[in-house]
């Protein structure tokens, strides 16, 4: 560490690494956040992928980014705007300038700022020279040429310079944020250990970037972010999709029911399937079906045969699964359906996130067709939400629709590693062999739940199917009163789940001027905004819902203590209308955004203040 | 008594006591029309299940929608009456979740070849070890008589008052084109052959498709009469037996020979033809060329091939799934979810 640079303490910083798809920005961002985590900071990240897999080189369409928010206090979101932008080419600068705070630092690879690249990026002239960036602090680092220079004595080809440029940028940033290089070098060792020339090249360039920053004293000072006060324990960094996959595996182990995933690739849900396919050693069977329908139908078959059955998808896929969800409802078989929401309708914007599948989850089927609907709140919460979805599905013999979204699915945050033995127990209502009283639709008088009898079990042969069945004995029935009874039973069974889930929490006082209501993947932004206002002494509380159908049983109590209720969601008002239906005694204000983007904390604060100020 | 025997590498629970038809007769009223060909299929299934050797709780019948798909209600096994076209997908999940089951799909030409066409071909391509009974009556019965993907061109139905203008599927061709390992064709009225073929299908490892030429007495009566009628059947049915020459006709004087690149019906004794010229059936042959030609044979030039046309041995999807899991369990360091949670890059905050 240099003795020359001043060290300035800061509380948090948002850094965004941007470059062409091939520039390794995801890895750079991940390594930068890992270094922060190892130094004790809290953090949240979000990758910003281009829509195209291989867009033309150095164009705006091909820009890939990775945003990291690190701090010495609790970090709830990956940040609205960045304090530091690292731009590896002109196109990435052009695409991201709107996300940079005024006065922020922009670090560019000056070697890439040349005529040809301006044209490709859509710049008329060099943006660094024409005064358009005067309000920022620009560091023009010769990343490409210094990388080449660092590699001259090593036995690697010229292509290696392109592949390791990101390490130069990383080294530079690690210096600026007062980090040690060791954890990063250890990572590179693990990754490239088998390929010595590549390993040496990466380390050499990383060091070059670090030393360059030290030597030129490019910034007036370097920054230090003190370790956050984080609960003691063992942690890891986790994305929502990985967390969901692991939550399912944990539920499988806890319930002793083997995991079966029938699924079809779809952005942004595919990573759950990819992750589960890696864990056959835990007995997970992953079936990549021929389409979305076969995904859920194979899962339902596996559910009948006694597996913890899961299917994963995104909005358009959920539409295709509708009929089969109805089949799960009428057969009263457990299945977890995870919908990682993306911007719709139809194909919409697959790489962008929103919360607009709630109506579909609640109502998108024929007939009276209730299912449990839940929503995960954050990347790490995807673990617990998936676990709970599986627990509810099996214990209550019902489909459970778990809503995630592209933002939390791909975003990452610190995850305190739990012990499986500390997770709740799961007790599926499995029928006993040769039980003389077994009837396929005989129900538990408390929960209205029927028993689960797998093929192979002696003495319990029975049939289920899409035709209405007689309550109890389970034969096909078209009796009008029986149909009414079964419709009521299926509804009552789902409503009963409210007695087995946690009460709705309020963050803040139980009464006051303003209650903010939100659900699903917006928890981070909501918490940040509400936290800020609460610290200013404003009378605002937050109720962030994880259980939607049924709502927690204290919901009426939660809603009643406030002068105003503002429901915020990334759709045109689906949850607010659901509340208007279920708890019509209140009037609700709503705040919506449907741009394929998360809420900005600053926008939320402005909106909340406006609500508080208006009489 | 050793009550376990092995199919490939999977151990199956065998019934300890001999079973009989009564073990599978359901208490539900069978609601097919009197005279419907489906009754004979039900009889055959009840006759063959006790012979297969699995314990009775290890049979599972899955169906889609249509007249055929009422089947699970009429047999006393575990059963899943699914939704239209999806029986193959449901059955795949059942079999993968519990490979020890004998899984049977009851489906029709509309269910499997129209709305469920995608699942049908992929089930076959993967070679999941299930048995599929394809009730081919060339019509939609349950919706009261619309043409199906197997209705011959020109068929007049309620939705084709001037006759259909579509080329029908030949199920055998579709099965073999989908990499099928087992295909048989039977007639609903020949219960002896149907039972034998079902038994062979149960013994086959992989997806076994049995096309049953089933008569819908209400909406497509005598649709298969060109093949099944008393007057025509001797000349229009070729009963295949493995290792036997392909002879047909009242006195078995006619036969099939390969002439260049196509099959040809010939008469023994005419033009110097002897039995040596007649093709000998090899149902186990891996190459599907002759099997494909056999499935495509149709009158009047050629008889319709009946019996087991193809029964080739290839690895099954469900076996390979188990194998991969077995391998992963033996070789992965991750033995439980706690191992997983603590694997890779973790750090401790003191
Ligand atoms: S409509 Fe036809 S196929 Fe259906 S039960 Fe009646 S005869 Fe059989």
Image: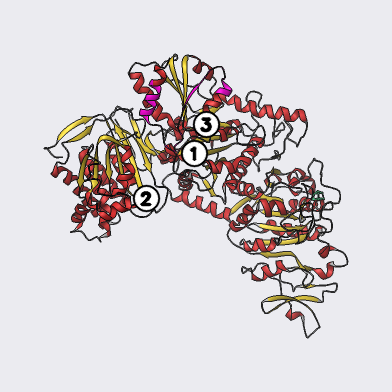
Mark 3: give few (<14), some (14-19) or many (20+) Cα within 10 Å: many
Residue at image mark 2: A62
Mark 1: give few (<14), some (14-19) or many (20+) Cα within 10 Å: many
Q: Earlier in the sequence, mark 1 or mark 2?
A: 2
Which range is magenta?
A: A580-609
Q: Given contact means CB atoms under 8 Å apart, are the residues at marks 3 and 2 in contact? A: no
Quarter of the view holding residue A351: top left
- Are tags 3 and 1 found on a single chain? yes
Q: Earlier in the sequence, mark 3 or mark 2?
A: 2
Residue at horizontal 71 percent and vertical 67 percent from the top = B296
Q: Secondary structure at mark 1?
A: strand
- What numbered label is drawn on residue A341? 1
Query: Does the magenta segment cover residue A136?
Result: no
Q: Secondary structure at mark 3?
A: strand
Q: Earlier in the sequence, mark 3 or mark 1?
A: 1
Residue at mark 3 to residue at mark 1: CA–CA distance: 13 Å
Q: Quadrant of the C terminus of chain A?
A: top left
């Amino acid at each position: 560490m240099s003795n020359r640079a001043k060290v300035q303490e800061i509380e948090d910083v948002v850094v965004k690494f941007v470059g062409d798809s091939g520039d390794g920005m995801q890895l750079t961002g991940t390594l930068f956040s890992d270094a922060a985590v190892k130094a004790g900071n809290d953090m949240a990240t979000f990758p910003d992928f281009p829509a195209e897999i291989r867009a033309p080189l150095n164009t705006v369409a091909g820009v890939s980014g990775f945003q990291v928010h690190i701090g010495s206090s609790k970090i709830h979101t990956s940040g609205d705007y960045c304090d530091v932008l690292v731009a590896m080419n002109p196109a990435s600068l052009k695409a991201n300038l709107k996300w940079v705070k005024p006065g922020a630092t922009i670090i560019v690879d000056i070697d890439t700022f040349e005529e040809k690249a301006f044209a490709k990026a859509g710049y008329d002239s060099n943006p660094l020279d024409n005064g358009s960036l005067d309000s920022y602090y620009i560091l023009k680092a010769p990343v490409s040429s210094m990388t080449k220079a660092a590699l001259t004595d090593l036995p690697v080809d010229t292509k290696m310079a392109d592949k390791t440029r990101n390490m130069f940028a990383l080294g530079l940033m690690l210096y600026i944020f007062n980090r040690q290089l060791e954890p990063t070098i250890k990572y590179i060792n693990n990754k490239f250990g088998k390929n010595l020339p590549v390993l040496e090249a990466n380390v050499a360039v990383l060091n070059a970037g670090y030393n360059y920053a030290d030597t030129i004293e490019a910034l007036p000072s370097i920054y230090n972010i003190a370790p956050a006060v984080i609960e003691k324990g063992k942690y890891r960094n986790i994305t929502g999709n990985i967390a969901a996959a692991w939550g399912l595996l944990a539920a499988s182990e806890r319930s002793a029911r083997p995991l079966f995933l029938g699924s079809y690739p779809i952005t942004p849900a595919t990573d759950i399937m990819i992750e589960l396919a890696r864990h056959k050693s835990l007995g997970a069977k992953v079936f990549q079906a021929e389409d979305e329908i076969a995904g859920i139908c194979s899962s339902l078959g596996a559910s009948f045969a006694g597996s913890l059955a899961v299917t994963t998808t995104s909005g358009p896929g959920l539409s295709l699964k509708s009929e089969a969800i109805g089949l799960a409802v009428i057969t009263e078989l457990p299945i977890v359906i995870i919908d990682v929401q993306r911007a719709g309708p139809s194909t919409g914007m697959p790489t962008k996130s929103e919360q607009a599948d709630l109506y579909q989850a609640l109502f998108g089927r024929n007939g009276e067709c209730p299912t449990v609907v839940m929503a995960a709140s954050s990347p790490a919460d995807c673990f617990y939400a998936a676990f709970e979805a599986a627990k509810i599905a099996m214990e209550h013999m019902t489909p459970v629709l778990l809503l995630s979204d592209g933002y939390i699915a791909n975003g990452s945050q610190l995850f305190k590693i739990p012990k499986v033995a500390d997770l709740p127990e799961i007790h599926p209502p499995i029928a006993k062999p040769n039980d003389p009283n077994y009837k396929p639709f005989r129900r538990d008088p408390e929960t209205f739940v029927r028993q689960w009898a797998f093929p192979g079990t002696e003495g319990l042969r029975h049939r289920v199917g899409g035709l209405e069945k007689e309550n109890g004995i389970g034969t096909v029935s078209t009796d009008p009163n029986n149909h009414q009874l079964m419709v009521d039973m299926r509804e009552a069974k789902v409503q009963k789940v409210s007695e087995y889930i946690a009460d709705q929490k309020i963050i803040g006082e139980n009464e006051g001027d303003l209650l903010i209501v939100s659900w699903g993947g917006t928890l981070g932004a909501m918490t940040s905004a509400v936290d800020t206002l609460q610290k200013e002494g404003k009378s605002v509380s937050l109720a962030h819902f994880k259980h939607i159908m049924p709502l927690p049983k204290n919901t009426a109590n939660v809603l009643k203590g406030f002068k105003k209720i503002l429901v915020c969601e990334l759709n045109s008002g689906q949850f607010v209308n659901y509340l208007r239906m279920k708890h019509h005694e209140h009037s609700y204000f709503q705040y919506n955004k449907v741009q394929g983007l998360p809420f900005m904390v600053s926008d939320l604060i402005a909106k909340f203040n406006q609500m508080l100020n208006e009489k | 008594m050793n009550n376990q025997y092995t199919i490939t590498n999977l151990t199956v629970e065998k019934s300890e006591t001999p079973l009989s038809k009564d073990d599978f007769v359901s208490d539900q009223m069978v609601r097919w029309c009197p005279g419907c060909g489906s009754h004979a299929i039900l009889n055959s299934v009840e006759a063959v299940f006790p012979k297969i050797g699995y314990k009775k709780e290890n049979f599972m019948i899955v169906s889609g929608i249509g007249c055929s798909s009422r089947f699970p209600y009429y047999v006393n096994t575990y059963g899943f009456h699914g939704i239209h076209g999806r029986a193959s997908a449901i059955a795949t999940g059942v079999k993968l979740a519990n490979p020890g089951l004998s899984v049977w799909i009851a489906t029709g030409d509309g269910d499997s070849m129209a709305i469920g066409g995608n699942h049908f071909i992929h089930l076959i391509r993967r070679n999941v070890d299930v048995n599929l009974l394809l009730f081919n009556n060339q019509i939609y019965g349950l919706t009261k008589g619309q043409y199906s993907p197997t209705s011959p061109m020109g068929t007049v139905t309620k939705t084709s008052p001037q006759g259909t203008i579509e080329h029908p599927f030949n199920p055998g061709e579709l099965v073999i084109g989908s990499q099928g390992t087992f295909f048989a064709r039977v007639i609903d009225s020949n219960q002896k052959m149907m039972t034998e073929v079902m038994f062979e299908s149960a013994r086959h490892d992989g997806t076994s498709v049995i096309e049953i030429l089933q008569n819908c007495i209400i909406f497509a009566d005598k649709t298969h009469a060109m093949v099944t009628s008393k007057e025509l059947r001797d000349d229009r049915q070729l009963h295949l037996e493995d290792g036997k020459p392909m002879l047909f006709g009242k006195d078995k004087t006619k036969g099939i020979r390969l002439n260049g690149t196509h099959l040809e019906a010939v008469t023994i004794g005419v033009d110097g033809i002897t039995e040596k010229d007649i093709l000998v059936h090899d149902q186990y042959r891996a190459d599907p060329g002759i099997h494909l030609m056999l499935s495509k044979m149709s009158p009047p030039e050629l008889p319709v091939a009946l019996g087991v046309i193809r029964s080739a041995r290839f690895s099954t999807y469900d076996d390979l799934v188990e194998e991969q899991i077995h391998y992963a369990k033996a070789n992965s360091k991750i033995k439980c979810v706690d191992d997983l949670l603590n694997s890779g890059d973790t750090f401790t905050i003191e």
